[in-house]
């Protein structure tokens, strides 16, 4: 009898050690993720040359910079979303490179949208009665500038953001359908079929109806009050949050 209890205690002890080891491993991966994330920004605050390079790169090579920022930060956001949902950052079939490339190209469209809505909204506001709206964004922080930033953010998120989010969801479903097969991954997505397979209750209820008015419009309003060279970096940081939102909208948290 004592031998049976001893074996049971040993079995429970081994199981406990295995669980503890697994938890420590997960915590280590979290620490690595945080270090990498912070490490992407620290050098630019420590070195004036790197900071000047960042400003030049973000201004003169804006679309290339946008591709890189979104490829890295938005993909890390999806990794974080996977960590929340499944417990691991890179589950089987995650297709890291493919996701990064998709986010990179989406980042370039975000830059184009910033230019279109940032330049066009002041014209609309002038037609609605705002005086010198085209020069307000370059001036000091005033009530008129906050109002204009809010208007730009609202137009951006109503007319462009839904297209961005649905496009990303289609690419995400294409990755899931490929199930880790690189040849399937590189085929042209069946967009009509993928659109039909979207969970529109989740897409509408979480991503569009809630996140746009409650988070994205206020967040991008703040972003448009920043100097222009920082807006795409902040947008890329926001895309980390977007990656989490889209990942959670794709499935229940476990």
Image (cartoon, rainbow, N blue to C red):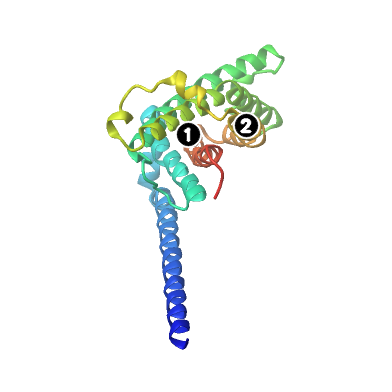
Residue 143 x/y as whole percent: 71, 31
Query: Does residue 74 sit above or below 60 in this rendering?
Result: below
The residue sitting at 45% across, 55% down in the picture is: 34
Extreme bottom residue here? 2
Residue 98 x/y as whole percent: 34, 34
SS for dot 1: helix
Tell me the mark number nearer the camera, choosing from 2 and 1: 2
Q: Nearer the viewer, residue 100 or 176?
A: 176
Residue wearing tag 2: 212
Question: Does residue 100 appear in the picture of this structure?
Answer: yes
Residues at circles 2 and 1 in contact by the CB criterion of under 8 Å:
no
Q: Quadrant of residue 155?
A: top right
Earlier residue among tags 2 and 1: 2
Mark sitting on residue 152: none
Q: Nearer the viewer, residue 126 or 96?
A: 96
Horizontally, residue 228 falls left or right of residue 151, namely left
Q: Gap between marks 2 and 1, in whole Å?
A: 18 Å
The residue sitting at 36% across, 32% down in the picture is: 178
Extreme top residue here? 127
Residue 56 x/y as whole percent: 38, 34
Query: Does residue 82 sit above or below 142 in this rendering?
Result: below
Extreme left residue here? 183
Residue wearing tag 1: 232
Question: Does residue 66 appear in the picture of this structure?
Answer: no
Residue 129 x/y as whole percent: 72, 15
Number of numbered callouts drawn: 2
Mark 2 neighbour class, 10 Å CA radius: few under 14, some 14 to 19, many 20 or more: some
Mark 1 neighbour class, 10 Å CA radius: few under 14, some 14 to 19, many 20 or more: many
The residue sitting at 30% across, 35% down in the picture is: 181
The residue sitting at 51% across, 35% down in the picture is: 235
Query: Does residue 194 sit above or below 89 in this rendering?
Result: above
SS for dot 2: helix
């Amino acid at each position: 009898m004592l031998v049976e209890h001893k074996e049971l205690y040993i079995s429970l002890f081994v199981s406990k050690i295995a669980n503890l080891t697994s938890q420590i491993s997960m915590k280590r991966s979290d620490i690595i993720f945080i270090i990498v994330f912070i490490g992407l920004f620290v050098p630019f605050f420590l070195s004036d040359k790197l900071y000047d390079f960042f400003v030049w790169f973000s201004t003169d090579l804006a679309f290339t910079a946008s591709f890189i920022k979104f490829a890295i930060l938005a993909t890390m956001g999806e990794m974080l979303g996977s960590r929340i949902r499944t417990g691991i950052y890179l589950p089987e079939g995650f297709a890291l490179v493919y996701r990064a490339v998709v986010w990179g190209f989406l980042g370039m469209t975000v830059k184009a949208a910033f230019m279109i809505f940032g330049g066009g909204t002041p014209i609309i506001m002038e037609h609605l009665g705002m005086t010198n709206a085209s020069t307000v964004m370059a001036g000091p922080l005033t009530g008129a500038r906050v109002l204009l930033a809010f208007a730009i953010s609202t137009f951006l998120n109503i007319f462009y953001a839904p297209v961005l989010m649905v496009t990303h969801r289609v690419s995400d479903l294409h990755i899931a359908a490929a199930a880790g097969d690189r040849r399937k991954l590189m085929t042209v997505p069946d967009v009509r079929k993928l659109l039909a397979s979207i969970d529109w209750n989740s897409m509408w209820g979480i991503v569009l109806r809630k996140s746009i008015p409650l988070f994205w419009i206020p967040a991008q309003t703040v972003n448009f009050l920043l100097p222009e060279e920082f807006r795409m970096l902040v947008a890329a940081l926001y895309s980390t949050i977007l990656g989490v939102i889209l990942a959670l909208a794709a499935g229940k948290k476990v």
